[in-house]
Image: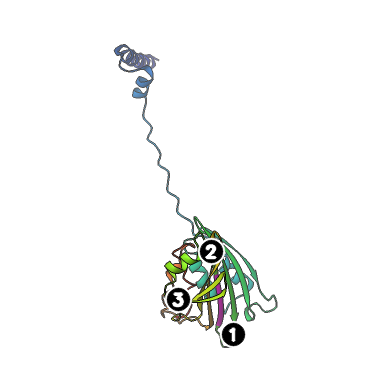
């Protein structure tokens, strides 16, 4: 009890000195004699990688022969994305021996796109693939063609629909469809009889633009699967 009284007297003495000096208010004096709390810094949260719903769905329905091609293309499209989901169709009686169809919705931080993929196994152990990335750019089709598709050969199917092909990349194309005030872009790649390279073999260099959200700088087609 004596110790408690001594402690209180010391506390009020410090408070009285602070007030009498006229330099500090009681609240500040109390803050000075009270223990200071160290601010807690928030722990940075790791960015979660979105689930590859296309590869998971293909695996769950029994796709095996075309699964490596499906998984590779899906991982390229999902790179840098924040979320995705998929609609799939397959033969319930013979999933691995018949065509597999899918339509994915892929979200990025400031954009989104649709990714359509058809995989057809063949009798030789290969897999034929048709893949399309569909997005909208806030620019005119003409400005995109002039800036990004120089050197491509243009084939006008309709007054508002032009297909651009690169002679050095068979099976790939970029379609631009006028959709004022923007442009609808379809990046397409078709490949027949693709086989997974042996373990350790180079799979080639996939096109980097496929890994970024749709924009003026990403009009390249879906990257080829060939090794």
Residue 68 against residue 140 in the figure, above or below: below
Q: Secondary structure at mark 3?
A: loop
* Residue at 61%, 70% in the rendered image: 102
Circles 1, 3 touching at the beta carbon (< 8 Å): no
Q: Magenta part of the protein: which range?
A: 127-132
One can see residue 34 in this view: yes
Q: Quadrant of residue 19?
A: top left
Which residue is label 1 attached to?
A: 122
Q: Residue furthest bottom?
A: 124
Instruction: Characterize the local packing of mark 2: few (<14), some (14-19) or many (20 or more) Cα atoms within 10 angstroms.
Output: many
On the image, the x and y values in percent for residue 109 come to: 49, 55
186 relative to 92 in the view: left or right: left
Which residue is label 3 attached to?
A: 152
Dominant secondary structure of the residues highlighted in magenta in the image: strand
Which residue is label 2 attached to?
A: 183
One can see residue 51 in this view: no
The quadrant the N terminus occupies is top left
Closer to viewer: mark 2 or mark 1 = 2
| Residue 174 magenta-highlighted | no
209 relative to 158 in the view: left or right: left
128 relative to 223 in the view: left or right: right
Residue 158 against residue 193 in the figure, above or below: above
Q: Nearer the viewer, residue 163 or 159?
A: 159
Label 1 to label 3: alpha-carbon separation: 31 Å
Q: Secondary structure at mark 1?
A: loop
Instruction: Characterize the local packing of mark 1: few (<14), some (14-19) or many (20 or more) Cα atoms within 10 angstroms.
Output: some
On the image, the x and y values in percent for residue 83 come to: 54, 59
- Counting residues from the start of the chain, the first of labels 1 and 3 encountered is 1
* Residue at 68%, 76% in the rendered image: 91
* Residue at 40%, 41% in the rendered image: 41
């Amino acid at each position: 009890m004596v110790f408690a009284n001594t402690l209180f007297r010391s506390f009020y003495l410090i408070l009285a000195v602070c007030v009498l000096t006229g330099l500090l208010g009681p609240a500040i004096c109390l803050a000075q004699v009270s223990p200071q709390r160290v601010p807690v810094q928030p722990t940075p949260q790791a960015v979660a990688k979105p689930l590859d719903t296309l590869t998971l769905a293909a695996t769950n329905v029994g796709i095996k022969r075309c699964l490596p091609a499906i998984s590779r293309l899906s991982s390229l499209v999902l790179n840098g994305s924040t979320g995705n989901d998929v609609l799939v169709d397959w033969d319930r009686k013979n999933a691995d021996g018949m065509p597999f169809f899918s339509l994915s919705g892929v979200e990025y931080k400031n954009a989104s796109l649709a990714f359509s993929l058809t995989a057809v196994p063949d009798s030789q152990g290969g897999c034929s693939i048709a893949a399309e990335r569909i997005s909208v750019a806030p620019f005119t089709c003409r400005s995109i063609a002039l800036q990004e598709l120089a050197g491509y050969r243009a084939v006008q199917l309709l007054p508002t629909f032009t297909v651009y092909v690169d002679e050095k990349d068979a099976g790939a194309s970029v379609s631009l469809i006028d959709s004022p005030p923007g442009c609808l872009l379809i990046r397409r790649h078709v490949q027949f009889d693709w086989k997974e390279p042996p373990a350790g073999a180079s799979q080639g260099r996939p096109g980097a633009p496929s890994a970024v959200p749709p924009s003026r700088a990403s009009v390249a087609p879906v990257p080829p699967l060939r090794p």
